[in-house]
Image (cartoon, rainbow, N blue to C red):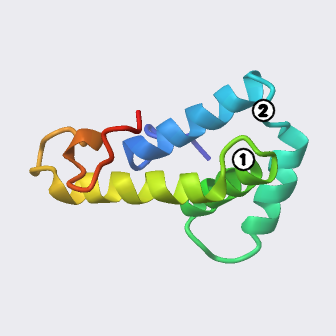
Amino acid sequence: MTAPDHPFDEPWQAQLFALTVALNEAGWLDWRDWTAAFGQARAGEGDYYADWLATLQTLLAERGVADAAAIAAMSAAWQRAARATPHGQPIALENDPHRDTRLR
């Protein structure tokens, strides 16, 4: 079997991978814990990177790195920004019509 030319279908998948590696390198995430949790998440037939994201969010919340509510709020803000961004333009949180300018 040959390796694919592009291991990621979407840029966010590569960013998610890079974030996970960076969290490990910074000491926030242990690979043994990661692989055990991700293995449990992959027990079903779900989307690979959706499972990856859910696993990362769960581990960060469990370790107190990021509050589950804060993760959900940020996710919602990015989704609103994506819907408000014209096609072909970069998505930025500033495009979120409900953004709280106090949060940076």
Q: Quadrant of residue 50?
A: bottom right
Q: What percent of the width, then of the height, locates residue 88?
A: 12, 44
Task: Please name whichever residue, 26 or 104, is drawn nearer the observer in this view of the structure.
Answer: 104
* Number of numbered callouts drawn: 2
- Badge 1 marks a residue whose secondary structure is helix
Return the residue at label 1: 60
Q: Mark 1 Cα within 10 Å, few/some/many (few <14, many 20+)?
A: some
Residue at image position (78%, 32%) is: 28
Q: Are marks 1 and 2 in contact (CB under 8 Å)?
A: yes
Residue at image position (20%, 54%) is: 97
Image quarter in which the C terminus is found: top left
Q: Earlier in the sequence, mark 1 or mark 2?
A: 2
Residue at image position (11%, 51%) is: 87
Return the residue at label 2: 28
Residue 57 horizontal side relative to residue 75, left or right: right
Q: What percent of the width, then of the height, locates residue 70?
A: 56, 52
Q: What percent of the width, then of the height, locates residue 90?
A: 20, 38
Which amino acid type corresponds to the residue marked 1 in the rendered image? Leu
